[in-house]
Image (cartoon, rainbow, N blue to C red):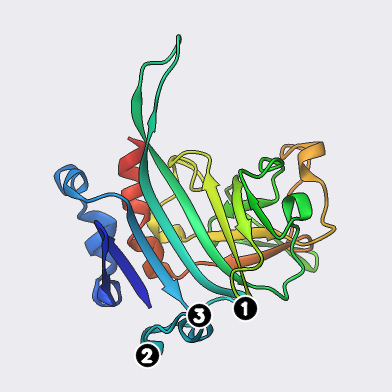
Amino acid sequence: MLKKNKSTSFVIGLALSLSFACYANALTEAEFKATKLPYSVMAYSNQYAHEYGLDASKAIDLPKGLEAIKLILYKEHIKGDEVLLPQDIYRCSAELYVDKSLSLYWPGNYPKVDKVGDRGLQKAQVSTVQLKRKGEYWVPGPYASMLYDSYDQTIKPNLAKINLGFFGCNYIPSRYTAVKDGLAIWLERKGGHNYAAIGQSEAEISSKDFYIFKLPQKLVNNYLPYARMAAN
């Protein structure tokens, strides 16, 4: 099921009936400026519907281990300082609900973490869905790091919540990514390779070290045009 946020209310199930072209080609600057923020789209599984008492008939199949995904566009006010003037900037983020049984890397190893201290260690990535086979593993085409903003391993008995931030709305995963390219979020497995220590230019991330969650295409159709408009 996909949910589309208009101001503070949700329109449930609307995105399922929209065509690809509607959002991929038809979003105008005027329509974007008229959109109430925060803007979000969401997909959830049958398990998530059961946990939160939602309509299970609107649940969809998600990649194994991913129970819900919400992509969010919002504005943040920057107070400014002696160098920068006060301003409002667009932020793009993702909220994931994952199966707690996944063997994930958790920054800081605390049950609940806000403002994660080692958030920039390249433990989460976003790529297109054009993956390439390399030996027995998969590697991405274009990809970019994401930031661990916070997480909560205690939100539900079987679920953990992860909040990730994109490196700006341009980097999803790059300014050249088209809606048709799709999106996948990569979360590093516990004990995975320290990519931050050697740098992305020296090593290619691999499914050996990451769980890969390919996002529903309809979710991407309804989000990426807004992120692109925000980045311009």
Which structural element holds mark 3? helix
The residue to which callout 3 is attached is: 48
Quadrant for the C terminus, please.
top left
> How far, Cα to Cα, is label 2 from label 1?
19 Å
- The front one of 176 and 7 is 7
Task: Identify the mark at residue 64; answer none if there is no mark.
Answer: 1
Disc ID at residue 209: none
Q: Position of residue 130 (x, y in %)?
A: 56, 60
Of labels 3 and 1, the one closer to you: 3
Q: Residue at x 73, y 76 (%)?
A: 101
User: The disc labelled 3 sits on which kind of residue?
Assistant: Tyr
Q: Residues within 10 Å of mark 1 (few under 14, many from 20)?
A: some
Q: Quadrant of residue 223?
A: bottom left
Q: Amino acid at mark 1?
A: Lys
**Residue at mark 2:** 57
* Residue at mark 3 to residue at mark 1: CA–CA distance: 13 Å
Disc 2 residue crowd, few under 14, some 14–19, many 20+, Cα 10 Å: few
Residue 69 showing in the rendered view: yes
Q: Position of residue 195 (x, y in %)?
A: 78, 44
Q: Position of residue 70 (x, y in %)?
A: 44, 63
In depth, the one of 84 and 153 nearer the eye is 153
Foreground label between 2 and 3: 3
The residue tagged with tag 1: helix, strand or loop? loop
Question: Outermost residue, top direction?
Answer: 82
Q: Earlier in the sequence, mark 3 or mark 1?
A: 3
